[in-house]
Amino acid sequence: MNFKTLMTLLTAASTVVAFAAAPAMAQDGPARFSLDLNNAANIEGDGGCRLTYVANNGTGAALEAVSYQVAVFDAEGIVTDLLILEFGALIEGKTKVVQFDLAGRACEDISRITVNEVAACTLADGQTGDFCMTGLETGSRGAIQFGI
């Protein structure tokens, strides 16, 4: 077999392998971690706001620690606080509900909450990754906007 025939066969084989692998990669999709601001309710007697988040680990890996620094905006669009929201550990595929209380601030005084940066993103094996931000999907089910 000459060199030209060998190269043609190798090229054809690599093309077949690439097309065969493509559907599996498309089905898996990118690693993602979703956060949904599911509810915001005033705390009776406290004057604060209880934020309820639903987190879902769709990264394909167990997470030991996930936390985000967020910016809280008042009704006029002014940043009033930078907070760390700690979601803790989540096994792969797990949905977790976490509540955070913002003391001294009624929910109607908050217009939006924006993810500023990742404070922690550690896999169960101790490695860190950037998918906690690059794969982050956000949403809100109420009047307070939540996003990146």
Image: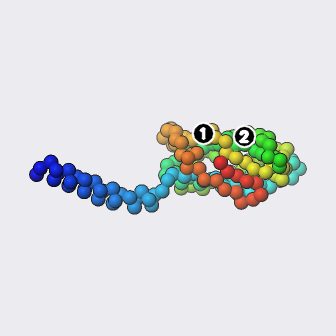
- Amino acid tagged 2: Leu
Q: Secondary structure at mark 2?
A: strand
Q: Neighbour class for label 2 at 10 Å: few (<14), some, many (≥20)?
A: some
Residue that numbered label 1 is attached to: 120
* C-alpha distance separating marks 1 and 2: 13 Å
Q: Residues within 10 Å of mark 1 (few under 14, many from 20)?
A: many
Does residue 103 appear to the left or right of 35 in the view shown? Answer: right
Where is residue 47? Give x, y as percent: 87, 48
Image coordinates for residue 14, horizontal then vertical, percent: 28, 54
Q: Which mark is residue 83?
A: 2
Tell me: 53 left or right of 109: left
Q: Is residue 109 left or right of residue 82?
A: right
- At x 58% / y 45%, what residue is drawn? 133
Residue 130, x across and y down, in percent = 53, 42
Amino acid carrying mark 1 in the image: Ala
Left or right, residue 122 beside residue 111: left
| Residue 127 in view here | yes
